Amino acid sequence: MTSTPTPLNALIQSIGSRTPSPGDYAMPIPGLGFYRREQPAAPVVCMVEPCIVLVAQGEKQLWVGGEGYPYDTSRFLVTSLDIPANSEVLAASPEQPCLGLTFKLDLRMLAELIAQGGLPPVRERAVMKGVGIGTVTDGMLAAFARLVALLDEPEAIPVLAPLIQREIHYRLLKSDQAGRLRQICSVDGQGYRIAKAIDWLKLNFDVTLRVEELAARVQMSAATFHHHFRQLTAMSPLQYQKWLRLNEARRLMLNEHQDVSSAAFKVGYESPSQFSREYSRLFGVPPKRDMATLRGRAGVSDPPGSG
């Protein structure tokens, strides 16, 4: 008689079979992605969306503002905002690859569950960081295993996936990271306003940033806005904009083969030499050398968005 695999073993089997080589893989279920790494790797620059990152095998770490957040099979990573970060692989080998999944959070669904589930909005004045490490529970693991199992039953995905995704959001709101998520969904809270400011920055990163105007846009004083922005993202608004500009320029040079000056001007820089200096500071090498390295790897590096 064949024994039923545990939820964790089921995840390892499913992720392993659908990730034939190191990389990041989008799945047919909206918001779900798998990843595979086969060796430890130094931190690489990435942007992590509001999501939960689960490890089924191995160990990873996210660096935000100089602070490390290690996570493994017993601890999950959660981000409640778009966080510029550095992702590091701590434990992986070809025989025991680091396998896991990313699950994009639906902040609207979280807000709806708070309203319907008798979970009061967070009223605390203290603003938490936009990233945290939570304890993986049996209920959470079982829900993810059921969601992943739908990949073997594609015709059931449109009907059953939304139900399981809702359950996962509910279990997150019952986890030790509930406060972090609930403060972003509280429309009268500072976290919600910072999230709205980040949405604006992502759409307008190429224009001159006036912090006072952006603070007024989200109905905060400039001092309060600056304080809470840094608390949540570990960056100032100007540093965040610079990060967005440099990463978009990197994408333009790599994917659209634009030269250094063209990419610099397109993302809002007036001086290509200043752009090159700041690019080297963020990525560790000048733009041209970085492009040569990235093209030589032929897509092996972590793309922005993986945790």
Image (cartoon, rainbow, N blue to C red):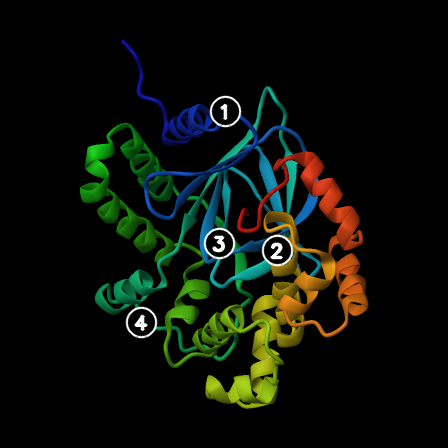
Relative depth, front residue between 162 and 268: 268
Relative depth, front residue between 231 and 19: 19
Identify which amino acid the numbered label 2 is placed on.
Leu
Whether tag 2 and tag 1 are in contact, CB under 8 A, the answer is no
Looking at the rendered image, the disc whose residue lies closer to the viewer, 3 or 2, is 2
Between disc 3 and disc 2, whose residue precedes? 3
Q: Please identify the residue farthest to the top as the structure is shown.
A: 1
Which residue in the structure is indicated by mark 1? 20
Relative vertical location of residue 92 with respect to residue 135 in this rendering, above or below = above
Mark 3 to mark 4 CA distance (whole Å): 20 Å
Helix, strand or loop at mark 3: strand
Whether tag 2 and tag 4 are in contact, CB under 8 A, the answer is no
Mark 1 to mark 3 CA distance (whole Å): 26 Å
Which residue in the structure is indicated by mark 3? 78
Between disc 2 and disc 4, whose residue precedes? 4
Identify which amino acid the numbered label 4 is placed on.
Pro
x and y percent of residue 88 in the render?
A: 65, 44
Which residue in the structure is indicated by mark 4? 120
Relative depth, front residue between 302 and 189: 302
Whether tag 3 and tag 4 are in contact, CB under 8 A, the answer is no
Mark 4 to mark 1 CA distance (whole Å): 44 Å
Q: Residue at x 31, y 67 (%)?
A: 111
Viewed as shown, does residue 141 lie left or right of 278?
left
Mark 2 to mark 1 CA distance (whole Å): 28 Å
Identify which amino acid the numbered label 1 is placed on.
Pro
Relative depth, front residue between 280 and 295: 295
Helix, strand or loop at mark 4: loop
- Residue 229 appears in which quarter of the rendering? bottom right
Between disc 2 and disc 1, whose residue precedes? 1
